[in-house]
Structure formats: structure tokens, C-alpha cells
Amino acid sequence: MTSGQPRVFLVDDHELIRTGIRSELAGSVDIVGEADDVQAAIEMIVERTPDVVLLDVHMPGGGGLAVLRAVCEKSLNVRFLALSVSDSSEDVISVIRAGARGYVTKNISGPDLLDAIYRVAAGDAVFSPRLAGFVLDAFSLEGRNLEAGDVDPDLDLLTPRERQVLRLIARGYSYRDIATELEISTKTVESHVSSVLRKLQLSNRHQLTHWASERHLN
Amino acid sequence: MSLETPPRPVIGSPCRPYRRGVENAILGGVCGGLAIRLGVNERTIRVIFSLLALVSGVGLLLYMLLWLTLPRANEEHSIAHRLLGRRRELHRVLFGFILVVAFIIVLDRLGIPSLGIYTWPFLLSVAGVIGVWRGATPDEHKHLEELVRSAPLIRVPTTPTKKNLLLRVLLGTVLVLLGLRTLSRLHGYWGGSTSVLFGTMILIAGVLILLAPWWLATLNELSGERRARVRVEERANVAAHLHDSVLQTLTLIERAAGDESAVVRLARTQERELRQWLFDPHRVVGDEAGTYTSQLRSLESEIENDYGVTVELVVVGDCAADDDVLALVAAGREAAINAARWSDASSLSIFAEVEPAIVSLFVRDRGKGFDVDAIPHDRQGIALSIRQRMIQHGGTSTVKSTRDVGTEVQLSLPRTP
């Protein structure tokens, strides 16, 4: 086992995708195992406690969400990065809310994926442009639906700075580009993104549910 | 029996015509419907029907008659209406009835006395039940199936155990024997109408318990068949779609194997189409041509098709595409074409957002960039066409570019309320 390299576990029901990811990551991370179904994934992740799990959102038998819930119950020090081709915002948001530290699409380039894995391993959040768009959409609608008598005291809407960061991510900026653009440090950018993630995960406000159901209806 | 108070008709509200109840139905909803119609407690009506059933089975017959001839609430036709309308169903009901008559005759021959004065009501009721089963709507079928399933002792466990089976056979046999014995004593010194009724009921219960697994298996098979048919149809639809789109594209990709950009283009086009089909099935192509998002989506496919670069499009919010928005998209199109043509980047990001007061569009590439102040002469026109177009519609445009980092064109337009 090489120290310093994050220990990565692959969960995907497609052999081709796993092979592709494995060859792209070979040498840069320590791949400690892979699984192609929910049950096997849960057992092996609990047994091997990898640093980062690359998790497919869509799988038979409950999907990535089932794996996330089962493993998070055990409160191990395992971080999840959702990896999906899914375009459906409900799927993505629900995986994030269940505890994933980030979401990237499967057409991500090898170096970008590696970067995302290292970032998740270090405890940061990884937002792809698409995820940033989903989150902005969710919170902007939330803001719009807010009536005077409907204000939740815990309502931690995004701060203007967080919104700014999310917009830049959606525009295709890397964290370093954002730091340059806003004249702040990369660490600050990371902390903004982490705080957005925390708000998503901690809030169980009805507005977000409402947003999801509205999207579903449309 | 339901403990809830029966729904009473409100005076002045239309309560005709008489319908069988749905919510308060135990069996066919006849009593429940009558209770609603007359505004009487449904328990009273049930007691009356039960008493009438004891009096030479009149209640039973009346019940069956009403069950067959009254439409269920929310339904247009009665069961009898449906049965008479279908010749094949009618034949089946008659066939079932003949079977029951034959059964009684066999009992008679075997020296087991028939049911006395209850024979005919019983026979007619059995025929009625067969009729109800054949003519019921799927909705009512569901209600009846639930009824059978929830009846204690008849419930069939998903995995039948030996012990379970033994208990079932034992109980069923005992009840059947007990029933036959009670009936066979009819002409004995303590025979009478009560023992006939009890004998019959015990007999029926025994038979039900013995045959329940078989009966339910048949039921499940039938609904399983229905489900399978739906699945086959669904599968045919999916297969047709996959053939029309995915298979065709794969063939094209095989033929274009040497041409990398053509392969990428085909794959991306197919991916977009499949995504839309999977995640956005209700949106028909060309349906929402009038919105900002749909304009941007067609821009995305245009750029990907014509220039072989991948476009990452993120849209937040949406609005109608009026002239100003169309101009914004046109300016964005120029910017995207520029990026695709000159930046040498393999992908570009387009981000669009609709806010209450502003519509914005960002086109960004991570290509080689250029010096904005020294735009080559042949590209000035394009920059102007972006800028001028935005100014004409009251918007603004900014071009930011850094060598070897990339270029971003920022466009925004105030929204007219």
C-alpha cells in the first residue's frame, strides 16, 4: 500500500466504466476494491474503509443512495464522490443530501477526476458545473417561494458570496480560477463550497422538497 | 362491521340514483349504498338483510339481485349490464350455474340430503357470485381480492410451510365433515332450518379453506398475465426507440470509425437525444421552442454538431424567448462559434441564468486566449456584432481573455417586466 495516495473504492454496475476508471487512475491512487452491486459494495466498504468511494448513482437494488445510507449509518471515515451520467436533478441532489461530498459526470477527464478524488479525500467538496446549476436553481426557487409568514428561523439561504462562487463553477471556472477572479485564496473558495454542501445536507426544509417535486412534475 | 358513522345524505343534495357503496362496502356495497340512499345506519340495514337471509334465503337472493343490477358508485353500468352485453361471459355464467346444479344432484344421489328450502336461494346465489366475479370492473375485483386475502385462515403465506399446509388440510377436512354431518341429520329428530344454514356455512368454510391456495394462485396467475402483457408492450416501445435512434447511430459510428471528430459528434448527438428521452420524456422536440432554455439547447447541439467540440450547458431558471432574449442567444452563438473555431479548446462552458431583473449568458473556453485590445482585424467584425447586438437591445457585453488561460464572453440583458 502506497502511503500518501488516497485509497479508492469503485462502485459501478458497468464493467466497462470500472475498467475505464481503473486504467485512468492507475498509479495515481490506491484502488482497494470494486463492487458491482449495492450489497457487495456496502459489505466491502465497511470492511476496507477506503478514503474515497467513487459511487455510481444509478444501480439496480436501490442505487448509490442505498450504499450511502447504509455506510453513513456506521459513521466510518469514508467519503463519497458521486459519479454518474444522470441528468436528473432530483437524483443528484438526493445523493448529495444523503452525504456525498461531490458529484461529477462520467465524461469528466482523467486529470479532473483525479483532482476531484484528491479534493474529496482531503475533506473538500467537489461541485461540477452541472451540480452548481442544480443547487442555484434549488435555492433561487426557494427564495422566490418565501412568503412573509413562511420564514424558517433556521433558514440558511446561500450568502451572496456563496452564490457568486457557485455561479463561477457553473460558468466552468476551476477553484483556482475562482480564487483569482474574486481575489481570495483557493482555501477560501473551498470553504465556501463546503459550506454550501453543508447547507444542502443539513437542511431538511420543505422548500427543497417542494422544489424537487415541482421539478418532477414539470 | 365498520365502526364509522355512515355518511348521511345532506338534505337538498342530489342522492338519486341508488348506487352501491364503495367506501363503506364490506361485500358488494349493497347495504352501504342503501344506507347512504336512505340516510339510515348501515348496521341496521345489514341486520335486516341477515334476518331476511334466515327466512328461506330471501335476504340472500335480494342481496345478489341488487349486487348484480345496481351500478357501483362512480361507475356507469351494473354488473348485469356488462354481462348481458358480452355473450361469452353469459355462456360462462350459465356453465358455472349448471355445474353447481350438477353438484347438488350428485349430493342427492349419494344420499346426502340437499339444502331443503335453502337449495334454490343457495344455488342462485352461487350463480350470482360467479356472475359478479365475471362482470366486475377491475376496481371491484381489487376490492374482492383484498376481501378474500384478508379473510382469516384463508390467507396464504408467501412461502407455504409443511406445518401450515397440514393445519389447512386438517381444519378444512374437519369443517367439511362437520358440515356434511349436520346436513345429513336434516331428516333426523333435531333437524331444522337453523342446522341447514349452519351446516351449509360450515361446509362452505371448509371447502374455502381447502381450496384457497389453489384459488389464489389462479388469481395471481391471471393478474400476472395482465402485468406481463403490459411489460411486453412497454418493452416493444423501448426496443422500437432504441432501434430508431441508438442502433442507427451505432451503425453510423462504425462506418465513421476512422474519423475521430465525426465519432465524437455522433456519440454526443445520440447522448443528448437519449438523455432527453430518459430524463425529460414529456418534452416533445420543438414543443418549447419559445423558451430561453430550449433556444440554448438547440444552440448547444448546433455547436457540437458543426464544430466537434463538447459543450457543457448549465441553465438556471427559464423565461420566454422574446426578441431581446433571442438577440442575447444570437450574440452568445457568435461567442460560442468563436470559441469553438479559434480557441483550440476541446470543450466550452455555457452558463445561463434568469433572475428577476436580469438575464445573463456566459460563454467560456479554456483555450489559448488572445489579447483583447489587439483583436486581429478579421475578428473585429464578430466582436462588434456581439457588442452592437447587445447594445441595441439594452444589454451589456464584456470579453475577458488571458493568453493560455482562456476566454470568457459575458452577456447580460435587463428583463422587461
Image (cartoon, rainbow, N blue to C red):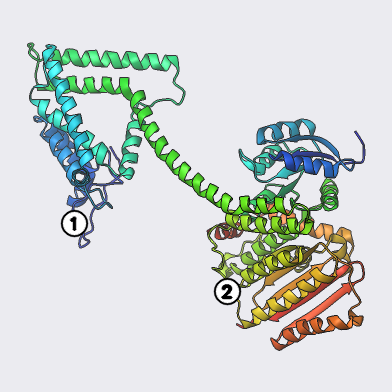
For the residues labelled 2 and 1, say whether their Cβ atoms are less than 8 Å apart. no
Q: Quadrant of residue A44?
A: top right
Q: Residue at x 65, y 56 (%)?
A: B270
Residue B106 figure quarter: top left
B164 versus B223 height, above or below: above
Q: Can you give x and y, in whole percent of width and height, for residue B137 in the image?
A: 29, 44
Task: Say if residue B185 shows up in the picture.
Answer: no
Residue B333, placed above or below residue B121: below
Q: Amino acid at mark 2?
A: Gly
Density class for disc 2 (Cα within 10 Å; few <14, some 14-19, many ≥20) is some
Disc on the earlier residue, 2 or 1:
1
Instruction: Please report, as a chain letter, where disc 2 is located.
Output: B
Q: Estimate the x, y position of residue B102 in percent, counting from the top left.
A: 15, 22
**CA gap, disc 2 to disc 1?**
49 Å
Q: Which residue is mark 1?
A: B16
* Total numbered circles: 2
User: Which residue corresponds to mark 2?
Assistant: B290
Question: Could you tell me which chain the residue with mark 1 belongs to?
Answer: B
Callout 2: helix, strand or loop? loop
The residue located at (64%, 71%) in the rendering is B295
Q: Nearer the viewer, residue B249 or A135?
A: B249
Left or right relative to B315: residue B93? left
Residue at horizontal 41 percent and vertical 17 percent from the top:
B164
Seen as rendered, the residue at the extreme front is B255
